[in-house]
Image: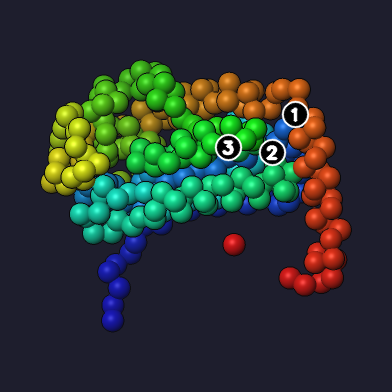
Amino acid sequence: MSGSGTRPTAYGLLPADTTQDVRNRGADLSRQVAVLPVGSFEQHGPFLPLATDTLVACAIAREIADAYPVHLLPPVTISCSHEHAAWPGTVSISSVTLHAVVRDIADSLRRSGVAALVVVNGHGGNYVLGNVVQESSARGEHIALFPAAEDWEEARVRAGVRTSLLSDMHAGEIETSILLHAHPEMVRAGHESADFTADDRRHLLTVGMSAYTESGVIGRPSLGSAEKGKELLASLAGAFAPYFELLTSGADAEADKDTGAGAAAESANSPSKSGGSSE
């Protein structure tokens, strides 16, 4: 059997840190912050890859990691894309599963001494991530969801994106611009003539995306450019500053650091670690 031809692959999505890198980066912080990109694997029209949301989330997270001393995590690549099920290639997990995955990651980070987590969401359908942050914060845990709608709006204006956030719903000007900047090899021909808008989508969760668009596109990808993508990411990196300050400040930050360091040391000296036995 022959393959289907050369397939483009995005490299550099997995952080190359060692455990010492993580330890050194957090040494001067009152509370160390991890950044978790969450994307999806869903249709983005005929010109953007199924992994678009993951690529976008990773591009944002990488921009953050270049500007702040955070612990960059590998991405969650499949999430809640049920509204895109009419298109082949789309894969989803339940909201319950995504909730549990993020909770487990946060719990694991705290056990190894990283007390705070920022979830960088690249897919608008991951509504449950807001609930994860809401519930975790109510328990006194240090967690945030980024970017907020206000962060996207500021980035849109700064970058000169002409399409509103309402109209730029899927595979539009913003996503096309970010990929043209961060992964131009992943953008195929056709985005120049794929514009389609459907601003009234009040029944989206009931009838799915296919009731509003035949191509899978809702937005104006023809307006996308690498320059806009670069400015979008730069703006979002700047917007992250108050999130970082919020999570690393506070009277209990030193206590978190001491507790995390003690837990990490206890784990390192446990019988299972020292006895030679090796998600």
Q: Is any part of residue 52 visible from this angle?
A: yes
Density class for disc 3 (Cα within 10 Å; few <14, some 14-19, many ≥20) is some
- In this rendering, the answer to whether 261 lies above or below 256 is below
Q: Position of residue 56 (x, y in %)?
A: 41, 40
User: Disc 2 and disc 3: Cα gap in Å?
Assistant: 12 Å
Q: State the residue position of label 3.
A: 136
Q: How many marks?
A: 3
Q: State the residue position of label 2.
A: 115
Q: State the residue position of label 1.
A: 253
Which badge, 2 or 1, is on the more N-terminal residue? 2
Residue type, mark 3 in image: Ser
Density class for disc 1 (Cα within 10 Å; few <14, some 14-19, many ≥20) is some
Q: Residue at x 76, y 48 (%)?
A: 20
Q: Is any part of residue 222 visible from this angle?
A: no
- In this rendering, the answer to whether 277 lies above or below 192 is below
Front position among marks 1 and 3: 3
Residue type, mark 1 in image: Ala
